[in-house]
Amino acid sequence: MEELNQVLLQRRQKAQELADLGVDLYANDYRPSCAIRDVLAKAEERGDSHQGDGPEYAIAGRIMTVRNFGKAAFLHLQDASGRIQVYVKRDEVGDEAYAIFKKLDIGDIAGFKGPLFTTKTGELSIAATVVKPITKSLRPLPEKFHGLTDVETRYRQRYVDLIVNPEVKDTFKKRVEIIRLVRDYLNNRGFMEVETPMMHPIAGGATAKPFQTHHNALDMTLYLRIAPELYLKRLLVGGFERVFEINRNFRNEGLSTRHNPEFTMLEFYQAYATYHDLMDLTEEMISWIAAEVVGTTLITYQGQEVDLTPPWRRYTMDEALTAVAGIPIDVLADPVRLRQTAMDHGISLDASAGHGKVKTELFELLVEEKLIDPTFITAYPTEISPLARRNQDDPTVTDRFELFITGREIANAFSELNDPIDQRQRMEKQIANRGDDEEIFPELDADFLRALEYGMPPAAGQGIGIDRLTMLLTDSPSIRDVILFPHLRPESTNS
RNA sequence: GGGUCGUUAACUCAGUCGGUAGAGUAUCUGCCUUUUAAGCAGAGAGUCGCGCGUUCAAGUCGCGCACGACCCA
């Protein structure tokens, strides 16, 4: 238990004084009649000025500011829906209630009842006739003008951040709205939302380090999933032709402004579709969500204008390397010269890296960050796309795209590989090429291959990072701004 | 993993050349019945992130550690 400083002691003392006056410090016998937003809306309907002669409203919320005049006071009360001023006058509420009111603090939760009036300065306010202490706050809130800005405290004590920084609340409301719109969009197109395992016996569907756990009764290692892909495809085999899942993935890797160890991913699969269909779907869905959430498809992200109005630019990886990075076509086609170009840019390549890998490295270094407006990049090398279908005309590339907006990968999709023989070979190759430093060796998912052998209909599938999409649409610079409780190192115990 | 910057009152921040720890908000006391960053007068509030070192003397200089931010890999 931390030592109580003066402020905390004073709060506890005040709480005791209230209790001595017979006040229940944690009462649960008050029911507000109205959300603050609804009070404001009703006042708007009624129009003109309010003289305290209208209906009474019972509201409840947290006291955010107080301006005290001795025998009267103004305060701002905040609930989930908004904020309104309350005027408490001794002559109106009575001596006893006013004495109790004087012992309330900023940060306390209280109820007030009374009619509306408009103050001299023109602010719509509640003229309290009843004061009801509801919950005592034993800790002071951050300063009213600057609020809470220390990012560490904001993330560690998100509850305080949410109380005092209204734009934070707004961001998380938008996040929920985005997810709701994704669901609506896919449900309306015949997709079925499913839940697949979070704990996998084999960590598959992506290349990433998994978290490990242990099942005691079965005495076996399990991995928190790095991707749901291989399970969703099993459902295609089973006959569900349009499925999606919005859920957490876990990757045991570094933290940054773009990476949290657990993050939310949308994955969806559509039978009898190709990656071309998914490009159409994606630009329609994301531009629609932007219009709903932001109100426009012309958005600003960290001072940059981004135009989400369809249609979006589509480049093959080769086209992008030429158009954006200025690499001549004949160099692109020549493995030796391209490798030299990569090395000239300081890219270190090991001997096993093929032509496709070299291209991808150059793309990541020279092109990605320049793709500000939404851009689909297609024709990813087969070498780095173990689960994607090969292109009919050029088997060295796959029918795959990634979507970049503001220089960041937002989505990854492909026409799915459904040839079980090809899939087995590619997985075996991937396992053979594993790095020696990998702590967890990739394993062949025999059951997934068995499922494919029953026949998976041709399909296209896609993953969209919900956190990054939310960052884009809420103009948030860090993934921690769109995750309620982002992962941080443990708080030091000596603080 | 490397580099840069930061950590001082509950919050937001100052702190000069190394010489008694400062402000605003919040809190407490008094005045104040239409204020809104209310006002006026007064008061209390600090392990200067942690540890070691240099020095007569360290918030300040050096080293190490913790946590965080940004950049790089």
Image (tube, grey):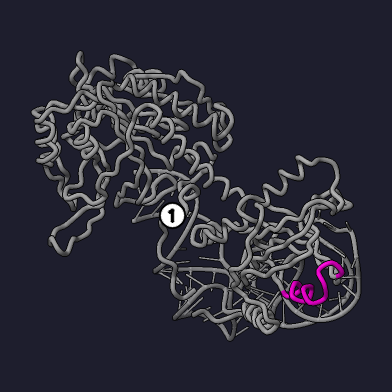
Q: Is residue A366 left or right of residue A174?
A: left
In x, y percent, where is residue A86? 77, 59
Residue occupied by mark 1: A486
Q: Is residue A269 left or right of residue A323?
A: left
Residue A94 falls within the magenta-colored stretch: yes
Residue drawn at (34%, 16%) of the image? A328
Q: Amino acid at mark 1?
A: Pro
Residue drawn at (81%, 40%) of the image? A47
Q: Secondary structure under badge 1?
A: loop
Image-quadrant location for residue A74 = bottom right
Residue A374 showing in the rendered view: yes
State the extent of the magenta-drawn residues as a range: A91-103
Mark 1, chain letter? A
In x, y percent, where is residue A327? 35, 20
Residue drawn at (53%, 61%) of the image? A153
How many neighbours does mark 1 have within 10 angstroms: few (below 14), some (14-19), or many (20 or more)? some
Q: Is residue A151 left or right of residue A445?
A: right
Nearer to the camera, A3 or A69 = A69
Q: How many marks?
A: 1
Residue A284 falls within the magenta-colored stretch: no
Whether residue B2 is situated above or below residue A297 in the rendered picture:
below
Nearer to the camera, A187 or B42 = A187
In x, y percent, where is residue A378? 32, 22
